[in-house]
Amino acid sequence: MLTPFTNDIKAKLFAHIPPDWQALKYIAEKWMEKDLPPETGIPMACCQYAGGNALQATGVTAALLAGAISLRILDDLSDKDRVDTLWNVAGENRAWNFAFAFKMISLQILHTAIIDNERRNHVQEVYLDKLMQMGAGQDMDLSNRAATFESYWKMMDLKAGTPFGCAAWLGAVAVSANRDIWNACYAYGHHLGLAIQILNDREGIWSGKSVSDLDRGKVTLPLLYALYCEHTHKERVQAIVNEGTVSTHASWLRGVLEEIEAPQYLVWAAWQHRSEALAAIQNGGGKAAGARILEAYVNGIFGDLVPDGTLTNSQAFALPQADVSADRNSVPNKDAEYRSASLRLRQRI
């Protein structure tokens, strides 16, 4: 999606790197050699959906790219699960400094990317609000405060729904003053981000990698599903989580998750957000050409994954819902209350 515009995005990013900071430029160049983060392609399509030309979104895309580089550096500093990372080469202190620099560059680029003065001020306010929401979600994750099904959904909303929603919204606001289209794009990105996070949690256990989330002792959505689903192993699963011995029992826990069909549940849950994302753009009033690109994008992420039909019955867990409006006065903040129809899970066992 970005290949024809890569040079323009790169030029906008590099224009804000101080000429005497060669190390920062080197890091940016290395990033441009990789596949760009998935959320950076969304503004281009949403710009077309809002009636603009994709080139008009290269500024906000460059801003998001700088922000994505900053977040990746911070994630690597937090996880420290790979050796080929910036902190391992340059040291932790320099990595923190580089992350801060790219965050500031993101804000600088964004300030110049929106031509309309009134809209520019609104964008800056919303973008800063979103950064704070993402930070709140990251802190919930790092402090292990997402220990219940409901709190984990809230964490995902802040950490995953917010950045993708913001990316889509920025593409629309770059060229349009139509708030209905803004909100449709934000809803699309928000649900897409949640779907991707759910699939990432699935991949964290069933990707075939030598070290899984369970091996690391992480309590993610599949394990929380096992804590809320009625099955014969529920009490033991709860005891293992309470004792903090998930990694010790990783193999057994994986077997339990497969027995209660947790992988299938995750595909079903992600599919619900896929449907919401597609509905948002189909009903948002944008241009058909942009809608087709956005549809292809979300369908490409799912590939051949389809939900098990047995999971779509009335006993399926009702996903928590949140307001996904992009208006600054109505977007969910870190204290948002989430409405859930129930916390019932299927009673298959």
Image (cartoon, rainbow, N blue to C red):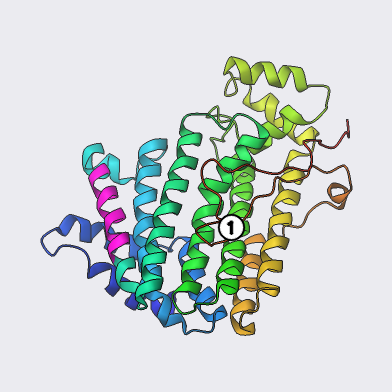
Side of 114 relative to 158 (left or right): left
Q: Is residue 53 above or below residue 9?
A: below
Closer to us: 177 or 88: 177
Q: Which residues are magenta?
A: 96-108
The residue lying furthest to the left in this view is 20
Magenta highlight on residue 288: no
For the image, the number of numbered tags is 1
Side of 228 relative to 9 (left or right): right
Side of 171 relative to 15 (left or right): right
Side of 68 relative to 155 (left or right): left
Magenta highlight on residue 101: yes
For image coordinates 24% across by 68% down, the residue present is 14
Residue 251 lies, in percent from the top left, at 66, 27
> Which quadrant of the view contains residue 302?
bottom right
Dot 1 alpha-carbon crowd within 10 angstroms: few under 14, some 14 to 19, many 20 or more: many
Residue type for callout 1:
His
Residue 271 visible in rendering = yes
For image coordinates 85% across by 51% down, the residue present is 312
Pointer 1 residue: 190
For image coordinates 80% across by 34% down, the residue present is 260
Quarter of the figure with the C terminus: top right
> Which quadrant of the view contains residue 21?
bottom left
Residue 246 lies, in percent from the top left, at 60, 23
> Which quadrant of the view contains residue 276?
bottom right
The secondary element bearing badge 1 is classed as: helix
Residue 322 lies, in percent from the top left, at 65, 50
Residue 208 visible in rendering = no
Q: Is residue 31 above or below residue 205?
A: below
> Main structural element of the magenta stretch: helix, strand or loop?
helix
Residue 78 lies, in percent from the top left, at 39, 36
For image coordinates 21% across by 43% down, the residue present is 94
